[in-house]
Image: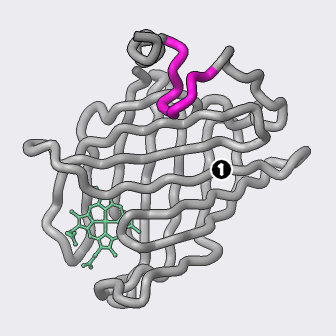
Amino acid sequence: LDELQRASSPHLNGLLLPSSEPPTMNPVLEPLSWMLGTWLSDPPGAGTFPTLQPFQYLEEVHISHVGQPMLNFSFNAFHPDTKKPMHRECGFIRLQPDTNKVAFVSAQNTGLVEVEEGEVNGHELSIASHSIARISFAKEPHVEQITRKFRLNSEGKLEQTVSMATSTQPMTQHLHITYRKV
Ligand code: HEM
């Protein structure tokens, strides 16, 4: 019974152990605090690339902190009709203290691991890949560069735009999506 009561506790944090009070945000995170929250695609995201048929996707995003000077994130994409899980990635966003320099570290379910770096200016974060690693049996074409832009728009929605260069295509937009906070 105790287990069940805990499972329905509003203080549960998605981990096995119940969380206590929400942690105080580390002040280093202030420039990125506009990214915090749970976000759902609205409308569905738009996928493009010269080699692909345009596609749509849904995405659920969790951006949180545990009091450390970094954000924890997960991006979880789904097929718009079947709701089948698709692309997933999770990682951390770090800020260099006393600067606007940002590092974004992500592991993707496709077998890609990447570090991006860039800057936060107001409600806009622009980053570009610094290093990309992939599993030895990754399908071609390989991703060679990635850039992303996150911004909080005037309606309070979060937007993400991802462009990439592959072994066959120059830097071109692959994703654009708007999320509403839930
Ligand atoms: C295809 C990279 C995120 C959906 C691809 C391709 C690459 C790629 C290299 C193959 C392109 C080609 O054949 O020329 C990435 C990277 C991502 C990312 C680096 C994140 C930074 C996503 C997300 C979705 C998605 C969030 C949402 C569902 C697709 C689909 C295809 C595709 C549907 C075509 C079919 C397939 O190959 O699976 N992506 N992608 N991608 N991507 Fe992404």
Percent of width and height locating residue 114? 56, 70
At a point 77% along the width and 22% down the height, the residue shown is 24
Magenta region: 10-19
Tell me which image quadrant ligand 1 sits in. bottom left
Residue 151 belongs to the span the image colors magenta: no
Percent of width and height locating residue 158? 47, 34
Outermost residue, front direction?
1
Question: Magenta stretch mostly in which secondary structure?
Answer: loop
Is the N terminus in the top left, top right, bottom left or bottom right quadrant? top left
Q: Residue beneath label 1, please?
A: 93
Q: Say whether residue 81 is left or right of residue 49.
A: left
Three-letter code, disc 1: Ile
At a point 33% along the width and 89% down the height, the residue shown is 168
Percent of width and height locating residue 148? 51, 58
At a point 50% along the width and 63% down the height, the residue shown is 107
At a point 43% along the width and 59% down the height, the residue shown is 162
- Determine which quarter of the picture holds residue 69: top right
Compare residues 3 and 142 and report the one nearer the observer.
Answer: 3
Query: Relative to 125, is 127 above or below?
Result: below
Query: Relative to 165, is 148 above or below?
Result: above
Figure coloring: one colour
Query: Relative to 169, is 118 above or below?
Result: above
Which secondary structure lies at badge 1?
A: strand
Compare residues 129 and 27 and report the one nearer the observer.
Answer: 27
Q: Does the beta carbon of the residue at mark 1 sit less than 8 Å from ligand 1? A: no
Percent of width and height locating residue 153? 49, 31
